[in-house]
Amino acid sequence: MRRLTFLVLSLVLLSLIGAGCRQSTPSQDADAFKVGMVFDVGGKGDKSFNDSAYRGLLRIADDFEIEHTEFEPGQDADRETGLRKLAQAGFDVIIGVGFLFSDSMRSVAADYPDVRFACVDFDVRQDEVLPDNLAGLVFREEEGSFLVGVVAGLKSETGRLGFVGGMDVPLIHRFEAGFIAGARYANPAVSVTVGYAGSTPQAFADPAKGKELAMLQYGRGVDIIYHASGNTGIGVIEAARETRKFAIGVDSNQNYMAPGHVLTSMVKRVDNAVYAVILAAYENRFEGGLQEFGLAEDGVSYAMDDYNAGLISDTIVEAVEAAKAGIIAGEIDVPRE
Amino acid sequence: MSLPGASGTTTPAVETVETAGTGRIVSLLAPLVAVLAAFLVGGLVVAAIGESPLEFYSILFRGAFGSVDGVGLVLFNATPLIFAGLAVAFAFRSGLFNIGGEGQLYIGSFVCAWMALQMPAAPAVLLIPLLILASAAGGALWAAIPGYLKARFGVHEVINTIMMNFIAVALTSYLVVEIFKEPGQMTPQTAVIPMAGELPRLAGFFQTIGVPLPNANPLNASFLIALVAVWLAWFILQRTTLGYEIRAVGHNMSAAEYAGINVRRTLVMAMLLSGSFAGLVATNEVMGFRHRFLDNFSSGVGFMGIAVALLGRNSPVGVLFAALLFGVLNTGALEVDIFTEVPRELILVVQAVTIILVVVGNEIVRRRLARGRAMGCPSKEGAEAS
């Protein structure tokens, strides 16, 4: 027993010496421009929303002299505490990824007027005026959804389209409204079947439910389904593969997930928005308030790559590009709900 | 009933700290030694992935004790754990294993927020005591159901409290998403409760006595309620007839019944009180910090309560110190997460190792010392091990 204790103790001492003083914190250099990023539940590595934000951060850290750190709150109260710790530690820009940060951002931004904050998908209140140091980054998802709606309207052979939403909230209604408007714009005779996976955040993480909804719609003659349901959409794409029909991906480019069966993806460029807001702060022209990212700002788009090149004809691409130009020019009015 | 060994007990967890003299020192020393051992092993884990344990711990403790703000966060993080730990410990003492703290705190918190929203004009002197009672009542109601099923039909409370957790989370989720969600918002949470129902933050108080706790620190009066709850739990258990009956039932149900104690009533009462403590988490989460009910806010506080109660050896004062230790770990973990490259999963590993070692080490040290005390009496040792 004593020998064991001795062994353990010496191991500990060795490791203390051996591991030495590997400095893993960002340097304490006061002049460096520092960006902190706090992730949503799901976190880094979700291959979708959070990762997109992280890509934006890495890209700008590459382009300029920027130090950065990221973390994921372990418990709910840590959202606010974590933001505060970053603010105290002298970070210049702090970014919260996800609308769950909205409340914490409001209160921390008020306490640290010299630090600039940005919140992706900010949950803005009616008639709310944001402080100068808080930017709410929101996306015009309906515009991107309109474009994939045009693709679906022109591509569909049965004239029946489907929509599978995740959580039944205004944010997702925007995807639905844009998609339906786009499909009708391309083909006024088209019909759209709509289904939602649920009304709690869990609805974004239920692939089985997604597959069930999709199978139901495909069974009724729907040949293309657009999903806006996070992880749940994996089930929709799976159903498209099984029934040999088409799905349309969302947020990140999901074309690769079932080659030949994912028509395109409505890409939400969280990375571009994050890049833009950090760049603005870096160049000292940061502005608070709500910032919208639509087609004109390259905040949303539709994905074309090797996986879907054979699925979408040049005439469709031309029609989509025409619709895109029309939206940017303000000639096409895209409904939000 | 106050035999030091209590070797007739059926649940080894229902061990009390009633020994005197050296026994008391041992029972204080054992968890301390175990915590130190856990930190050593945690350090090895950190070293194993190539990070410096020295830096890891210095950052962890800097987060917790490096500033007044950090200490305030420790107390804030400990507050819900005190309530959750008391809930588990209290039921343990009657021989019941209440795993339903999580569900009870959700119901307590929802009832608290709902009640507050019903009375937008009530003055603080009325609203605050009422909300505290509502929180406790919500938790008590939720715990009473498995308590009654246990007392009336002998259905095992472990299964029922777990099931009640699922129901509570789903029910509050449904209520807040479908009916009570703040209009025009996506976040699944209720509207803000009236100002009169908010518990004050303690920053102002500490500043007047010269302690520079920043205004933004979330530590609030709920911590004081938690201290009162610790005293109340101790008082009920040690100084009231009901407490005596609860302990008697916990030691030996048949003997208690034979002695004329109404076991069924005692079990239901123990669960009611246990649930009340869990429900009081609402004073911190709803009244003190967030000022609303947020869907899925808890991140497992109710379950952490089990570890807190084990570490605190089911005594109210023990729970207080165990909750403070966990508060230190949680606060330090955030600091480590933000300012080092150590992945947050590793922090969870270190926390889990700490819990296991504390619970196991606690037992080993206690027995080793107990053996030294009661030499030549190995058979008793064996009985205790059961």
Image (cartoon, rainbow, N blue to C red):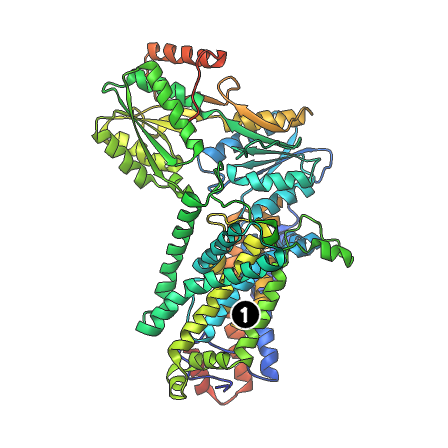
When the figure is inspected, residue B203 is found, relative to residue B358, above or below; the finding is: above
Q: Name the chain letter of the residue that bears numbered label 1.
A: B
When the figure is inspected, residue A133 is found, relative to residue B87, above or below; the finding is: above
Residue at (50%, 78%) from the top-left corner?
Answer: B243
Viewer-nearest residue: B202 or A253: B202
Viewer-nearest residue: B86 or A9: B86
Residue B14 screen position, x and y as percent: 46, 76
Residue at (75%, 53%) from the top-left corner?
Answer: B212
Secondary structure of the residue carrying numbered label 1: loop
On the question of residue B232 being in view, the answer is: yes
Q: Mark 1 points at which residue?
A: B312
Q: Residue furthest bottom?
A: B376
Residue A162 screen position, x and y as percent: 30, 27
Q: Residues within 10 Å of mark 1 (few under 14, many from 20)?
A: many
Residue B232 screen position, x and y as percent: 57, 72
Residue at (35%, 41%) from the top-left corner?
Answer: A206
Residue A109 screen position, x and y as percent: 65, 38
Hey, what amino acid is under mark 1? Answer: Gly
Decide if residue A108 is on the left or right side of residue B369: right
Locate the C terminus of chain B and report the quarter of the image it occupies. bottom left
Viewer-nearest residue: A258 or A278: A278
When the figure is inspected, residue A77 is found, relative to residue A156, above or below; the finding is: below
How many tags in the picture?
A: 1
Which of the 4 image quarters holds residue A105? top right
Decide if residue B286 is on the left or right side of residue B268: right
Residue at (30%, 15%) from the top-left corner?
Answer: A188
On the question of residue B17 being in view, the answer is: no
